């Protein structure tokens, strides 16, 4: 066995830098680095000389200077005596507001349109493809401007809303659409609003608890509880009940009871007809007719009879007992007609449950025993939530919340535009799941609903969600088109008025770009984390 | 068990022929049942959909069917609608605005006598596109595709015929340098040498040669130019007078016709109110229509005259300015060295505090003497620069052999969108491919730099980049370089879309099986050969649908230039709506612009879909 | 195959599936024409025929993956109609194995197996997992329980698919060309599993071209062409003495080499 000697150390030659694989990549990288550094140095030096020649420097101190301009929409307190930095913050809030609102509605629209586009119903599918194609193929700016033009040019002026004027408000006189924006009811929180909030949080916790209990129960005994319906009930019922109790027990309870009973009867009718005829379409039709008839029966028959009986018996028709019941039944009838209002467009599709209640509270409260009534001063009692309803005062609306046309136009156009892209993503996601998957699930005896939630959705979601998130990112970036309708987003404050007033273009645009970059990096980091957690394991 | 099996033995003796399905299983009934009424949810959906279609139809149909295509303003449109007895609730579309303005929507403010140039460029675009889309066309056509960009730029912006040739020559010279460099010191030297030589040619030699040619041709032509220009000045004055006289006559006629029309409209209104309309109203309607026709004709004539007048006036000013510059040329040329010298001396003598400032605004902290000195210097410098510029422009105007130049600011409408879109996508393609390769590279620094570039570009909205182009780009370039705004926008749009293209191409690269590159390595190809021969042809083919989609996106995004003051279709909508005649029109304009965008983007989208399907078929 | 196992392959005279004059159309194309078929419990039927002859459609009709338009199908005495309850009942008694396995790629093998027992049979999770492991043992891949379908070979995936069906304790099993998407060396492992299943007395309907399997296991071979049953017989008779010309032609084509 011979001893191996080290090979002679080769002498280093300059050409190895280029032709030796050990050095070659290093050489290239060093060369590239030099080029890039040179380029950056060139740009930076140019900036410095150019700025110097016109007597400027780079200074972010302007953020602390008084802004001196007003912003017509703000989520945080601001006035013109505050700084440019504060104005930028107001703009950022406005950008995030419209982006968040847009993301929510775009998702709803997109998912609906995407699913409906795959519907077997050819008319619906066709309508949805018209929607998707027309929004995808026309520039967003045009949509924003069009919506804005429609809102400002074809809506009435506030003064047209006077009695006998040409315009009227929507939804029981609660919403006014004008060329100065839409005025909507604004919630005003009164006594016990925190209790209501507490109940809501408690029901959320309750839902969480119930879900984990149901899961445990299923794992141990196999019993499946109706998680969805119980959750919905837990979410709504305690809050409604608390609200009614805190507002007025009897009125609320009667109202709820009668409405629920009617609804139960309708469901019964629906089930019976479906059983007998075996056709869901007929059942729907019959139930709808029954609902309509019931609404008229309540309004035209029972309620007047009760009121009349009360009057005959010498009971007061307002204030207590039969009278209240009677007058409320009239309201209930209105509600019912409202519920099925799609059949008769004169009754808007909204219940007036909480609108009229406030007026009666004061009087009725003293007659109704509420367990903790003694803790509350009845004279100062207000319902936990009331709504400030816009009302015409002079030439403009008072009260309520004014949502400017710029915000609505931007929000609507962004949601519809992004919704069209999301719809494509959803459609692709569902189509990506092979037919075999649902067949296999059916063959195992899973119902279509379960097949959807256990087999199709988990797979489709991992296809849908990454493009969905990048659509959110696009929406956020596209919100900078606020410029088209003068919505005061961060581009308009920091990147617009502030730049013009201070002449700090370089700093302003750097900050603006930095903000958008920050948002996109946050979103893409989140997306990458999601993708990593959902990668399919393959051989 | 055996008996059961035996009893089941069966052989068919006659085959059953194909039968038609039962009626409830075929035809329209089945289709309707399965597609529209298969479940209660479906029934509701059908009802809703029919309701929506009905609503849309009855909302849009009367409006469209009442539409007016012939009117001079929105007011006239409404008058005609009223005369026609259209229910104001239904209303009617006033497409007359499109008839009035569509040329502007296509060409912007491009001089109308030169429309043939963009039209020719547009037609040739398809010739140039042919060999790219259909690879089996003759290879010779590719040469035309390579020349086309220069030809198109020359056609649209005009100028001397040698400027595109000089730019083109840079490529040839760079290539020659590359070949020699490679021969001398390997490919690395070749690339560096080629790029360097080409850059020197473009940045230093091209302007020099161009100016030299201008000067040579210009000096030779100076005398003849003076005679033709003087003759032209003499001829222009009577021409203008004649046009003005014609216009005056026409305007009187228009006024008369408007009076007639107003009378008729008022008559119609009265008739409608008194309801004695059966006989008179139809007659008034025809009369109004005739009157409007006459008005439109007259207005068209008047418009043509106005354009002619504007052009002669413009020409007259140009001719006179040029003439005076030519006369002043000898003086300017002799004085120029002195002017430049004294400006330089003044600058050298400036106090240190203001020595480098180029505007008075910069010197906020300076004393009044320093300010005065700076002011004198700046004035002297401006004088020198303006003299130099006048000399240069005069020679260029006299010595130009080629097309009349057109300013970028005159280009607008769909032409602008198309120019920015097409140049953005063509220029960004090579850059995007390089970025994609860089992002996939194993070289750490290059990969990180590419990732950083792509993410920064994609993380910031285009509108911010456009503002950067408008406000900041000049800061990043050496003093004195001043690009045209359109060029700046194209540069920014190119950088922007290259980041998106890079992501598309990266997808294509990632979709390629690893074995391809391994096989190329095994064959002994180097990196660039492997990329060029094996990887890119396949990856690009996969990426074409994505590239087409980013082109659609880019084309739609060109509308954003309206916010930095360019007249793209959206900007023109605003201009039109701001005019006195058409104030208040919006649906019609947005529908027109929207439909044009839709037609283009939708067909491109279908094309990309078709390519995608074709690819899938081929890969199966 | 061991001899003693054979004797357990009893056929009772209880009817498992009864199909009478069943017809089906795709649009106007008549795919299944007047199908009459009675399957007794414990039978092992192999259905063969040229492609497009309606074999797959026939067995897919049995658990309503396809809807038939005329005639009746009774499974275990329950008629297959548009009534969801009947469909549910039949689907949980009939297992099906697909050509392309159709495992759920986002779930582990164990989760694939326990999904239906938990959600359809409402079995407690632990119990479902025990049953799943039992069947995984039976198809000889218990060690793969926590992997994902994408990490398994084709043969293993198909065996998991069989186990998945078995977890629902079906009384009838349908096989839709279970081996035709497999590499040759993997066909055997799947066929072995199926043979074992047959030996335990499972009622099986199997669309396949594995004639070896037919001869070894089936008690009846059905030959279909143009949407109709052309010939059915015991395997030995069927292969050695085909009656119809079509059958002869088909057999000569597939056994030609």
Image: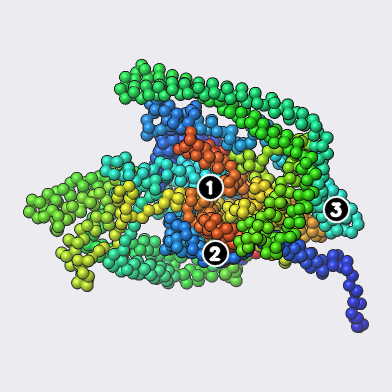
What SS does tag 3 mark?
helix
Q: Which residue is mark 2?
A: A62
Q: Position of residue C237 (x, y in %)?
A: 61, 49
Q: Are marks 2 and 3 in contact (CB under 8 Å)?
A: no
Q: Which residue is mark 1?
A: A140
Q: CA distance from mark 2 to mark 1?
A: 33 Å
The crowd level at tag 3 (other Cα within 10 Å; few <14, some 14-19, many 20+) is: many
* Residue at x-position 43% and y-position 59%: A74
* Residue at x-position 89% and y-position 72%: A12
- The label number, if any, that marks residue A100 in the structure image: none
Left or right relative to B60: residue C46: right
What SS does tag 1 mark?
helix
Q: Position of residue B38 (x, y in %)?
A: 42, 44
Q: Which residue is mark 3?
A: B178
Quarter assignment of residue B434:
bottom right
Label 2 in the same subunit as label 3: no
Q: Chain under label 2?
A: A
Left or right relative to C60: residue A187: left
Taking the image as drawn, is residue B416 in sight? yes
Left or right relative to A45: residue A403: left
Q: Nearer the viewer, residue C49 or A319?
A: A319
Q: Nearer the viewer, residue C78 or C85?
A: C85
């Amino acid at each position: 066995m011979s001893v191996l000697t080290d090979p002679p150390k080769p002498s280093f030659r300059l050409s190895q830098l280029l032709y030796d694989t050990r050095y070659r990549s290093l050489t290239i990288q060093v060369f590239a680095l030099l080029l890039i550094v040179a380029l950056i140095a060139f740009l930076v030096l140019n900036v410095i000389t150019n700025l110097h020649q016109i007597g400027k420097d780079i200074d972010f101190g302007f953020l602390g200077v008084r802004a001196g301009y007003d912003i017509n929409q703000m989520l945080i307190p601001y006035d013109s005596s505050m700084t440019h930095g504060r104005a930028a913050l107001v703009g950022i809030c406005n950008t995030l507001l419209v982006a968040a609102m847009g993301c929510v509605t775009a998702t709803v629209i997109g998912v609906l349109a995407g699913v409906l586009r795959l519907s077997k119903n050819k008319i619906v599918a066709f309508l949805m493809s018209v929607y998707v194609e027309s929004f995808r193929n026309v520039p967003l700016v045009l949509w924003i401007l069009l919506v804005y033009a429609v809102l400002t040019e074809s809506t009435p002026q506030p003064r047209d809303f006077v009695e006998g004027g040409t315009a009227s408000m929507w939804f029981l006189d609660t919403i006014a659409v004008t060329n100065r924006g839409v005025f909507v009811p604004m919630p005003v929180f009164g006594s016990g609003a925190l209790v209501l909030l507490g109940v809501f949080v408690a029901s959320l916790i309750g839902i969480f608890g119930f879900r984990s209990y149901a899961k445990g129960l299923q794992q141990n005994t196999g019993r499946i509880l109706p998680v969805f319906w119980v959750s919905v009930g837990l979410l709504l019922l305690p809050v409604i009940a608390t609200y009614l109790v805190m507002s007025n027990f009897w009125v609320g309870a009667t109202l709820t009871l009668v409405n629920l009973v009617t609804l139960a009867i309708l469901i019964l009718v629906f089930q019976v007809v479906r059983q007998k005829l075996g056709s869901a379409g007929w059942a729907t039709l019959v139930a709808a007719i029954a609902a309509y008839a019931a609404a008229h029966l309540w309004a035209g028959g029972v309620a007047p009879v009760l009121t009349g009986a009360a009057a005959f018996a010498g009971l007061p028709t307002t204030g207590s007992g039969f009278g209240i019941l009677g007058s409320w039944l009239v309201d209930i009838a209105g509600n019912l007609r409202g519920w099925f209002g799609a059949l008769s467009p004169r009754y808007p599709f909204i219940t007036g449950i909480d609108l009229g209640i406030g007026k009666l509270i004061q009087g009725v409260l003293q007659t109704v025993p509420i367990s903790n009534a003694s803790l509350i001063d009845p004279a100062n009692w207000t319902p936990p939530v009331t709504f400030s309803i816009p009302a015409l005062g002079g030439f403009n609306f008072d009260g309520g919340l004014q949502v400017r046309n710029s915000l609505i136009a931007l929000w609507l156009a962004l949601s519809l535009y992004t919704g069209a892209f999301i719809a494509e993503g959803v459609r692709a996601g569902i189509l990506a799941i092979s037919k075999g998957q649902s067949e296999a699930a059916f063959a195992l005896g899973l119902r279509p609903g379960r097949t959807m939630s256990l087999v199709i959705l988990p797979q489709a979601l991992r296809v849908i969600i990454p493009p969905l998130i990048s659509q959110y990112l696009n929406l956020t970036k596209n919100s900078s088109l606020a410029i088209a309708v003068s919505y005061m987003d961060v581009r308009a404050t920091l990147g617009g008025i502030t730049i013009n007033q201070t002449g700090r273009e370089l700093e302003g645009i750097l900050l603006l770009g930095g903000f958008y970059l920050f948002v996109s990096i946050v979103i893409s980091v989140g997306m990458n984390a999601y993708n990593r957690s959902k990668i399919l394991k393959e051989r | 068990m055996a008996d059961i099996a035996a009893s089941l033995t069966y052989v068919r003796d006659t085959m059953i022929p194909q039968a038609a399905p039962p009626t409830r299983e075929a035809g329209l009934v089945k289709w309707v049942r399965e597609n529209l009424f298969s479940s209660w949810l479906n029934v509701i959906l059908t009802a809703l959909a029919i309701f929506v279609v009905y609503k849309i139809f009855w909302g849009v149909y009367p409006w469209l069917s009442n539409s007016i295509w012939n009117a001079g303003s929105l007011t006239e449109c409404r008058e005609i609608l009223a005369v026609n007895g259209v229910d104001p609730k239904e209303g009617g579309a006033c497409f007359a605005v499109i008839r009035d303005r569509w040329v502007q929507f296509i060409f912007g403010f491009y001089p109308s006598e030169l429309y043939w140039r963009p039209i020719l460029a547009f037609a040739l675009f398809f010739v140039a596109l042919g060999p790219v889309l259909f690879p089996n066309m003759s290879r010779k056509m590719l040469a035309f595709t390579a020349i086309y960009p220069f030809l198109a730029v020359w056609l649209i912006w005009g100028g001397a015929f040698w400027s595109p040739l000089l730019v083109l020559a840079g490529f040839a010279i760079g290539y020659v340098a590359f070949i020699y460099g490679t021969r001398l010191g390997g490919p690395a030297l070749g690339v560096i040498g080629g790029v360097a030589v080409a850059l020197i040619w473009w940045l230093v030699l091209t302007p020099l040669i161009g100016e030299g040619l201008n000067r040579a041709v210009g000096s030779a032509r100076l005398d003849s130019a003076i005679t033709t220009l003087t003759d032209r000045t003499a001829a222009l004055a009577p021409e203008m007078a004649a046009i003005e006289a014609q216009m005056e006559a026409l305007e009187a006629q228009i006024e008369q016709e408007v009076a007639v029309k107003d009378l008729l409209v008022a008559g119609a209104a009265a008739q409608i109110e008194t309801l004695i309309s059966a006989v008179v109203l139809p007659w008034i309607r025809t009369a109004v229509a005739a009157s409007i026709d006459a008005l439109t004709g007259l207005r068209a004539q008047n418009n043509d005259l106005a354009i002619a007048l504007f052009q002669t006036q413009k020409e007259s000013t140009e001719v006179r300015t040029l003439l005076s510059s030519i006369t002043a040329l000898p003086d300017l040329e002799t004085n120029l060295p002195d002017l430049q010298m004294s400006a330089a001396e003044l600058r050298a003598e400036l106090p240190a505090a203001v020595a480098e400032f180029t505007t008075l605004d910069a010197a906020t902290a300076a004393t009044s003497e320093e300010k005065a000195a700076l002011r004198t210097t700046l004035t002297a410098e401006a004088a020198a620069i303006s003299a130099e510029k006048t000399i240069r422009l005069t020679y260029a105007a006299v010595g130009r052999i080629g097309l009349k130049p057109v300013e970028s600011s005159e280009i607008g409408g769909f032409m602008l969108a198309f120019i920015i879109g097409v140049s953005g996508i063509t220029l960004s393609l090579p850059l995007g491919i390089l970025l994609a390769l860089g992002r996939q590279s194993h070289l750490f620094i290059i990969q990180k730099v590419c990732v950083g570039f792509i993410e920064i570009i994609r993380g910031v909205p285009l509108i911010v980049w456009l503002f950067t182009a408008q406000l900041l780009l000049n800061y990043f370039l050496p003093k004195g370089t001043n690009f045209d705004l359109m060029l700046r926008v194209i540069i920014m749009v190119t950088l922007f879309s290259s980041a998106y293209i890079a992501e598309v191409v990266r997808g294509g690269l990632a979709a390629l099986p690893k074995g391809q590159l391994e096989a190329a390595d095994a064959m002994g190809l180097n990196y660039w050969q492997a990329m060029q021969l094996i990887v890119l042809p396949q990856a690009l083919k996969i990426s074409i649908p994505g590239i087409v989609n980013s082109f659609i996106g880019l084309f739609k995004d060109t509308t954003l230039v309206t916010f930095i003051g360019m007249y793209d279709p959206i900007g023109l909508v605003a201009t039109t709506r701001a005019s006195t005649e058409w104030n208040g029109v919006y649906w019609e304009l947005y529908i027109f612009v929207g439909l044009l965008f839709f037609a283009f983007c939708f067909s491109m989208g279908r094309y990309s879909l078709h390519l995608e399907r074709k690819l899938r078929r081929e890969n199966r | 195959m061991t001899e003693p196992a054979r004797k357990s392959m009893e056929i009772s005279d209880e009817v498992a599936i009864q199909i009478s004059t069943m017809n089906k159309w795709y649009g106007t194309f008549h795919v299944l024409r007047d199908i009459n078929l009675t399957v007794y419990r414990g039978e092992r039927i192999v259905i063969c025929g040229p492609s497009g002859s309606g074999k797959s459609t026939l067995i897919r009709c049995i658990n309503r993956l396809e809807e038939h338009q005329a005639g009746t199908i009774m499974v275990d005495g329950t008629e297959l109609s548009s009534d969801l309850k009947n469909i549910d009942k039949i689907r949980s008694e009939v297992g099906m194995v697909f050509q392309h396995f159709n495992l759920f790629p986002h779930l582990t093998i164990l989760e694939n197996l326990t999904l239906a027992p938990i959600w359809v049979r409402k079995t407690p999770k632990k119990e479902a997992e025990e049953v799943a492991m039992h069947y995984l043992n039976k198809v000889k891949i218990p060690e793969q329980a926590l992997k994902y379908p994408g990490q398994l070979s084709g043969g293993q995936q198909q065996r998991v698919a069989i186990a998945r069906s078995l977890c629902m304790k079906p009384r009838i099993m349908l096989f839709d060309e279970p081996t035709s998407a497999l590499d040759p060396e993997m066909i055997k492992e799947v066929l072995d599993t199926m043979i074992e299943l047959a030996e335990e007395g499972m009622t099986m309907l199997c669309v396949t071209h594995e004639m070896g399997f037919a001869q070894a296991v089936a008690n009846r071979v059905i030959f279909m062409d143009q949407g109709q049953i052309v010939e059915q017989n015991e395997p030995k008779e069927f292969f050695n003495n085909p009656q119809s010309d079509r059958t002869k032609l088909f057999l000569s084509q597939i056994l030609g080499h």
